[in-house]
Image: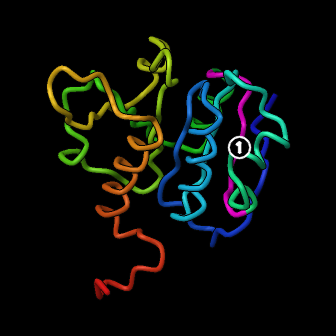
Amino acid sequence: MTAETVARAGTDGEEPLRLALFEPDQPGNFGAMLRLGACLGVAIDVIEPCGFPLDERRIRRAAMDYATQVAWRRHAGLEAYLAVAEGEARRLVLLSARASTAYHAFTYRPGDVLVLGSESRGASAALRAACDASVRIPIRPGLRSLNLATAGAIGLAEALRQLGAWPGDDGRGE
């Protein structure tokens, strides 16, 4: 199966960044990521299998009215996704609690994909090997990790800031 574009609305054709969700298993996080993508003009890739049925009813419920405002694609598995990412010459940047580079010390480039592992299993060895870089969000010692949607938002905010790609930002800070 090739990448399937599920919705494409509310984008201006430019794609400074993308978010990729690897085998997500929480529909609420999936919906939050669709909403994040809609609000910030960032397309989403979903690498299946998901831990929940990815059907129209659940998508509408998880994303509310934001699902039609975001461009997102579903991929039949990691191999299928990697073929698409390679064909688009994308650099894959894994957000991982195990990475040594802090997310704010990394230099993002237009076209980068911020990749997030599964909520329950994290990133597989194959996904880790396929990524070009890994970054972490520093948190207090003794705690495991942030919520997936929270981590995605933090990483995406820094990348958009570095690229000057905040939607609707005229630079005046108002």
Q: Residue at x 45, y 19 (%)?
A: 122
Q: Estimate the x, y position of residue 40 in percent, counting from the top left.
A: 51, 64
* Quadrant of the rendering where the N terminus is positioned: top right
Q: Estimate the x, y position of residue 124 in percent, counting from the top left.
A: 48, 14
Instruction: Say which of 61 and 110 sits in front.
Output: 61
Residue beneath label 1, please? 73
Q: Estimate the x, y position of residue 155 in percent, counting from the top left.
A: 35, 47
Number of marks in the image?
1
Is residue 11 inside the magenta stretch? no
Q: Residue at x 84, y 42 (%)?
A: 57
* Quadrant of the rendering where the C terminus is positioned: bottom left
In the rendered structure, the answer to whether residue 70 lies left or right of residue 124 reads right
Q: Residue at x 68, y 24 (%)?
A: 50
Instruction: Say which of 49 and 63 sits in front.
Output: 63
Q: Estimate the x, y position of residue 77 in percent, counting from the top left.
A: 68, 22
Q: Residue at x 36, y 57 (%)?
A: 157
- Residue furthest to the right in view is 56
Which of the 4 quarters of the picture holds residue 96?
top left
110, above or below 29, in the image: below
Is residue 71 inside the magenta stretch? yes
Q: Which colouring convention does the figure follow?
A: rainbow
17, above or below 28, in the image: below
- Residue furthest to the left in view is 141
Kind of residue sitting beneath label 1: Arg
| Magenta extent | 69-78
In the rendered structure, the answer to whether residue 63 lies left or right of residue 157 reads right
Instruction: Say which of 127 and 64 sits in front.
Output: 64
19, above or below 25, in the image: below
Question: What element does badge 1 sit on?
Answer: strand
